Image (cartoon, helix red, strand yellow):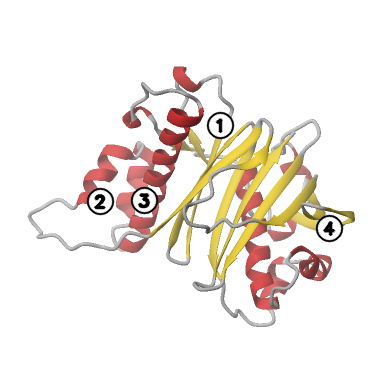
Amino acid sequence: MELTICSKPLFAKPTTDGLGKGSQKAIFRWMPVPQAISVPPERESLDYTLARQSLAPAQLRRYLALYRNPARQKELLHTRLLAKRLLYDYLHESAGMADIDEEEILLLQVEEGLRQGMPYLAPGPAWSHLNLSVSLAHGGGLLGAAVGENCLVGIDVEQARLRGKGFADLFLTTEEQQLMPLLFAGLAPDKCDSLMWSVKEAVGKALGTGFSRGFSSLRLQAATRTEEAGASCWLELDQELEIYAPGPYPRGMVYYDYDIEHSVCGVVCLLFS
């Protein structure tokens, strides 16, 4: 699969909505993680009320199971609320469905198999003709959501930090490490490490498989040419994962940005036929 990786102002304000070309397109949105607000014991927290109203049963059970980790609860809940709002805006504005209520939009997730945990939009008669995908992310104090049409979309955000010399060896081949200066020209090695992690995470999220077959199941190799839009590389998948790539001629666009002020990197990946 050929991937074109290029820089894009993903953290621009207002949020840049619109990636891709032609019928393969995606929109995305970021927001800060909401601050925790303490409530008296006799009152139900707003987050808990929102969770009961907005989460699918399997997600609500997971939310409740995280009661010892309120920060993780907040990330789980509010990334899904952000994705629901993004889906609502997309259906309203881009698809012209002005009569859709946000309560009708339900996010589910795959419960078994290699794609376990992958979010998707519950089928609905109003949008059954649309080929939509959705992806979620959290990290570095940010929550992210992306919606793709006629493509598989993956989004990731990471706090860039020094991780030690051996970090890249854990998840990158020698060829991938040599490829980073071409893909992310001008960035320091520690920033390239974080971006390369985000790229592979976003690709894995778009496929829905993540790193379920290990880090080397998604391998990037140098391409023989460089496009004007950015550096090109080849994505090689393990045989078990190939069935999840959009056929018959899978291609991809990967957009990345690095917020120098907050040391946060973000990636949005579109995979399409």
Which mark is nearer the camera, 1 or 4?
A: 1
- Drawn side of residue 59 relative to residue 238, left or right: left
- The quadrant of the image that shows the N terminus is top right
Q: Amino acid at mark 2?
A: Asp
Residue 47 has which mark?
Answer: 2
Mark 4 vs mark 3, CA separation in Å: 36 Å
Please tell me the numbered disc located at residue 62.
Answer: none
Kind of residue indicated by mark 3? His
Q: Earlier in the sequence, mark 3 or mark 2?
A: 2
Estimate the spatial distance between the alpha carbons at disc 3 and disc 2, rounded to whole Å. Answer: 9 Å
- Label 4 element class: strand
Q: Amino acid at mark 1?
A: Leu
Q: Tell me whether the residue at label 1 lies in contact with that at label 4, contact meaning CB atoms closer than 8 angstroms.
A: no
Q: Is residue 54 visible?
A: yes
Q: Are marks 2 and 4 in contact (CB under 8 Å)?
A: no
Q: Which residue is mark 1?
A: 132
Residue for badge 3? 78
Disc 1 or 4, which lies upstream in sequence? 1
Tell me the distance, in whole angstroms, between the alpha carbons under discs 3 and 1: 20 Å
Camera-side residue of 168 and 162 = 162
Q: Is residue 107 left or right of residue 189?
A: left
